[in-house]
Amino acid sequence: MQLTDFMNGYEQANNSHIFANVEPYIASDAVYWFTDGSYVGLEEIRTAIERTFAKIQDEVYTLSDIQWLTKSATVAVCRYAFSWRGTVDGKPQSGSGRGTNVLENRNGNWQIVHEHLSI
């Protein structure tokens, strides 16, 4: 799988608003840094992502300008811009920021081992 295809699939999985679709993209020992906190391991990450799914109704999450900083057979790092729009507490809302992901190829499958999103 091409790395950009991986990130596009990750974006689509997030837009399904079903964590079971997102989970295969995330390593069980991943660390995610969001504006509201740090989350270690799949269960903490699941809780944070599902909280976002519940808070932002009809969310559309978009990744753009993906730039690969390094790529090898086992590790890849990218940075990108992200944006979202949806409904929060009955009102249209939107936001944007920057992201960095570290991917590792484990047994032939790419997975995110670290994600850092900031606004």
Image (spheres, rainbow, N blue to C red):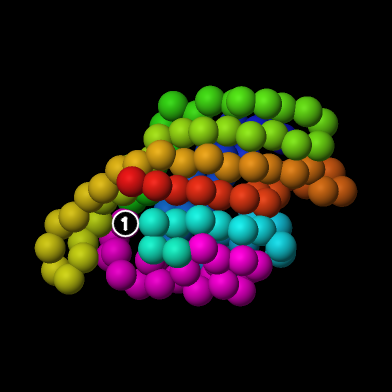
Relative to 68, say whether 108 is above or below. Answer: below
Whole-percent x, y for residue 48 in the image: 47, 69
Amino acid type of the residue tagged 1 in the rendering: Glu
Tell me what residue is drawn at x 51 percent, y 48 percent. 116
Q: Position of residue 34 (x, y in %)?
A: 44, 57
Q: Which residues are magenta?
A: 38-59
- From this view, report whether residue 71 is shown above or below residue 14: above
Q: Is residue 18 visible?
A: no
- Asked whether residue 11 is in view, the answer is yes
Residue sitting at 58 percent across and 42 percent down? 101
- Residue 24 lies, in percent from the top left, at 67, 58
What main secondary structure does the magenta stretch of the protein show?
A: helix
The residue positioned 67% from the left and 51% from the top of the image is: 113
Q: Give me the residue at 40% from left, 72% from top.
A: 51
Q: Residues within 10 Å of mark 1 (few under 14, many from 20)?
A: many
The extreme left residue here reads: 91
Q: Quarter holding the N terminus?
A: top right
- At mark 1, the secondary structure is strand
- Left or right of 85 on screen, residue 3: right
- Find disc 1 in the rendering and name its residue: 59
Q: Residue 82: x and y, percent? A: 38, 40
Left or right of 10 in this view: 104: right
Q: Is residue 6 left or right of residue 104?
A: left
Magenta span includes 49: yes
Vertical comparison of 57 with 35: above or below: below
Q: Tell me if residue 8 is in the magenta stretch.
A: no
Counting the numbered discs, the total is 1
